[in-house]
Amino acid sequence: MTHVCPQLVNVFGALNDHQWRDARKYIISMILNTDMTNHFENVSHLQVFYELAGEEIRDYWATVHKREGGILIQPKPLEEKDKRLMLLEIVLHAADISNPIKPFDVYEQWADRVMEEFFTQVCWVLSSIKIPPTAQVTHHNARAFCSCRFPKGDKEREEGLDVAAMYDRNLADKPSAQVGFIEFIVVPLYLELLRFAPGLDGIIPHMLNNHETYCNQMIAAKESDPDADKEAIAKLKDKPSAFRKRFEGKLGEHRVQTAMDQNPIVKKPSMKVSPPH
């Protein structure tokens, strides 16, 4: 067994007390901001920030991405602590919901894991009444301070309760869930980030391809039903082109096409259709 000196791996070791407290404050704030209740506020913050300083920051990041020589002058908005913290918070949140920007084969594995977590989780609610002022709540002892337990998914079914729709594995429709997640959650945030950062263009083909792949799975499942709604199928077939237009409307047709040309999806994922429930 190799023993590593703690001082060599302590990334905070060289910080003075003031810097350490700032770093701790930033990390806590960034983690708390990953809560989905903050999602649309994050999107709004990026939209407002782009109107105020977007082009200046975009040009700066484009130069950094191209690794061009010369002296780089950091835009003044990035010198403001609150603006830097806002961007750090949003980038971490974006990473937290980043599965759809990955190649499909990777994305699908994570989608399966997330859905399995929904089906098997149990929520415990902390009660301030049960926590003494001197108590240190950790992941080891948290349940001792919980006032109630909310079963979800499989646990709801085991206890004879109605199963919440999102948590019911017998009714879950993965392609539909992922298309909704991409369209209404992931893309609104990432389109705003892409406006700031041309260096992220490599994720555009993955988002478009992943969305189209799950749309095709939805179409295939519906077409296998003899009583399928043809109008609904036609609308699904229109989704990928309408989805791409969202990117073109925000980023420009040339930029989207260039991203597709430079980062082609070489191998289309195999078509997997979930059996109807």
Image (tube, grey):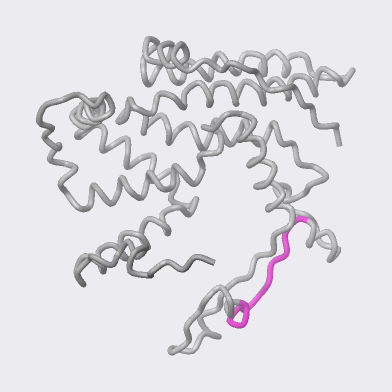
Q: Is residue 52 above or below residue 20?
A: above
Q: Position of residue 263 (x, y in %)?
A: 47, 18
**Residue for point 47% across, 23% down:** 204
Bounds of the magenta span? 143-153
Q: Position of residue 277 (x, y in %)?
A: 86, 37
Residue at the farthest front position: 1
Q: Is residue 7 left or right of residue 178?
A: left
Q: Position of residue 252 (x, y in %)?
A: 36, 14
Of residue 6 and residue 273, the one placed in the foreground of this image is: 6
Q: Is residue 222 above or below residue 182?
A: above
**Residue for point 79% across, 47% down:** 169
Q: Quadrant of residue 58?
A: top left
Q: Is residue 156 left or right of residue 4?
A: right
Quadrant in which the N terminus is drawn: bottom right
Q: Is residue 260 above or below residue 206?
A: above
Of residue 226 and residue 133, the one placed in the foreground of this image is: 133
Is residue 227 part of the magenta span, yes or no? no
Q: Position of residue 76 (x, y in %)?
A: 12, 40
